[in-house]
């Protein structure tokens, strides 16, 4: 690929450059863009599924950063793996034809994700390796239509999700590419030249939005280049003002070096981010079932997978503190969701069938966790004047002490999934002891929820 700018890219960039004119609602400045409210639907849904899938799923060793660790960092375990298992001269590009996706059934994927109780899904349309999961005009001969499965993997999942579920469909896109010569040239020029974003990254973003109309655009991988190099504010102004998803689209904060946890839509701050306290800005905890990798690993051990208890705790803590949880799975190169991931997703769905009222469409309460009993996390629904207390360990004496609720004579307490009111005892002006029912082994779970209404206080949103 030479440095010439494709005509399509010139047209799209000229279109974006005109956005600062009359009638534009959002200007291409962070001050203007950051003032855009995040669409309500995103805060309501709380739980989504991330899918890391790409050519890295073929070697499926170490992590999705396989190419970089092998040929960039020259990490010894990766070098040894290639030396032992592949012939001399084998290149990363040789993995491309092996990304076959013969068992890829997008409807089955959509149904499995729906069964998890998630309300949105985000697929990696392109990771840092540069390979696109759709037939991008700007990634010639390094995309899923030209090399590998010969299928539009993004389009097939978008169609399945929209035709068979009520999930919101989102796409991840990496701004930079490890070994793209255009990016490396710009980098050597201290990003004073902008050949790569003009010829590759920005045209891909416009193409993704126009072709697939994602409701979430999850940017990543700034390559240590500032947002001015990526022309991020101009693109986002177009996205919010003129694009076909301008009213409902949600974006994150990874639009250039220095923008993370500072600019954009919801904040991600870092991978696996869970502050454990309420934040003043909407945020998302993107994290993995596999503790060591976002992509599929053939050599993963069961001890390296988070348990369902771990995942429920992560969800509850995240939502109590005002965040969304984006839980990642890594499919195989042939298109299967590994059974350990499917099991975790279906377990999450079973838990949410009973306890979802404490998660979906909730707001943070004045207290995020309890002051007397550890492992108790709160959410609320102000319109219902209801507070939810999710506790992760069943007390041995059948009584749970809550230090935060201010009970009144009219207070009612229910255990979600159990019929009938529960008895309780007030602890002065603040706090209560709730007498739990005796449950048999069949009703045991990975976390339980008390719904408490008619408290001696007005239930309000803490943010």
Image: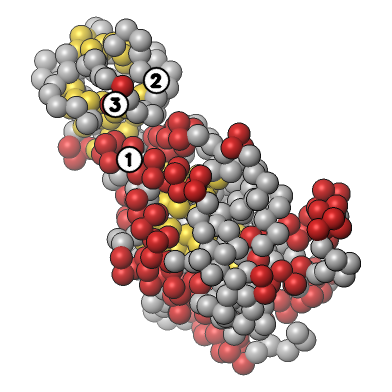
Looking at the picture, how far across and down is residue 107, in whole percent? 38, 65
> Dividing the picture into quarters, in which one does residue 165 lie?
bottom left
Instruction: Check disc 3 and report the residue beneath it.
Output: 442
Residue at 39 percent across and 41 percent down: it is: 348
On screen, residue 96 versus residue 16, left or right, reads: right
- Residue 420, given in percent of the width and then of the height, sits at 12, 24
Dot 3 surroundings within 10 Å: few (below 14), some, or many (20 or more)? few
State left or right for residue 285 relative to residue 430: right
Q: Name the residue under label 2.
A: 393
Left or right placement of residue 308 versus residue 11 in this view: left
Disc 1 to disc 3, C-alpha distance: 13 Å
When the figure is inspected, residue 460 is found, relative to residue 229, above or below; the finding is above
Residue pictured at 37% horizontal, 69% vertical: 160
Task: Please report whichever mark, 3 or 2, sits nearer to the chain's N-terminal start.
Answer: 2
Q: Tell me which corner region of the image, top left, top right, bottom left or bottom right, holds residue 291.
A: top right
Residue at x 19%, y 33% (from the top left corner): 385
Q: Which of marks 1 and 3 is in front?
A: 3
């Amino acid at each position: 690929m030479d440095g010439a700018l494709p005509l399509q890219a010139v047209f799209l960039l000229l279109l974006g450059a005109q956005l600062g004119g009359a009638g534009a609602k959002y200007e291409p400045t962070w001050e203007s863009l950051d003032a855009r409210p995040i669409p309500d639907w995103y805060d309501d849904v709380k739980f989504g599924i991330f899918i890391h899938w790409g050519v890295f799923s073929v070697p499926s060793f170490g992590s999705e950063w396989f190419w970089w660790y092998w040929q960039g960092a020259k990490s010894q375990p990766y070098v040894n793996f290639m030396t032992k298992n592949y012939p001399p001269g084998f290149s990363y590009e040789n993995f491309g034809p092996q990304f076959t996706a013969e068992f890829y059934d997008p409807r089955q994927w959509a149904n499995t994700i729906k069964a998890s109780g998630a309300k949105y899904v985000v697929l990696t349309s392109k990771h840092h390796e540069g390979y696109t999961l759709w037939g991008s005009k700007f990634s010639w001969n390094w995309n899923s239509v030209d090399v590998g499965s010969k299928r539009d993997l993004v389009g097939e999942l978008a169609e399945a999700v929209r035709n068979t579920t009520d999930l919101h469909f989102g796409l991840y896109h990496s701004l930079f590419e490890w070994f793209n010569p255009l990016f490396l040239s710009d980098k050597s020029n201290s990003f004073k030249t902008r050949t790569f974003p003009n010829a590759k990254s920005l045209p891909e973003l416009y193409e993704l939005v126009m072709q697939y109309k994602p409701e979430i655009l999850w940017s990543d991988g700034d390559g240590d280049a500032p947002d001015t190099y990526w022309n991020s504010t101009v693109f986002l102004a177009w996205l919010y003002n003129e694009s076909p998803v301008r009213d409902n689209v949600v974006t994150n904060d990874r639009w250039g070096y220095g923008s993370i946890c500072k600019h954009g839509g919801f904040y991600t701050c870092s991978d696996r981010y869970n502050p454990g306290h309420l934040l003043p800005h909407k945020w998302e905890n993107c994290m993995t079932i596999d503790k060591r990798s976002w992509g599929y690993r053939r050599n993963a051990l069961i001890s390296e997978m988070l348990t369902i208890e771990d995942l429920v705790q992560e969800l509850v803590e995240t939502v109590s503190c005002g965040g969304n949880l984006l839980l990642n799975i890594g499919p195989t190169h042939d298109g299967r969701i590994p059974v350990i991931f499917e099991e975790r997703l279906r377990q999450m769905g079973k838990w949410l069938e009973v306890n979802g009222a404490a998660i979906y469409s909730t707001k943070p309460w004045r207290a995020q966790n309890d002051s007397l009993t550890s492992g108790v996390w709160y959410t609320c629904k102000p319109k219902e004047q209801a507070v939810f207390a999710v506790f992760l360990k069943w007390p041995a004496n059948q009584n749970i002490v809550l230090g935060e609720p201010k009970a009144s004579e009219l207070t009612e307490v229910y255990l979600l999934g159990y019929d009938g009111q529960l008895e309780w005892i007030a602890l002065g002006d603040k706090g209560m002891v709730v007498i739990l029912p005796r449950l048999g082994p069949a009703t045991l779970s990975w976390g339980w929820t008390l719904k408490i209404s008619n408290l001696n206080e007005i239930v309000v949103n803490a943010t």
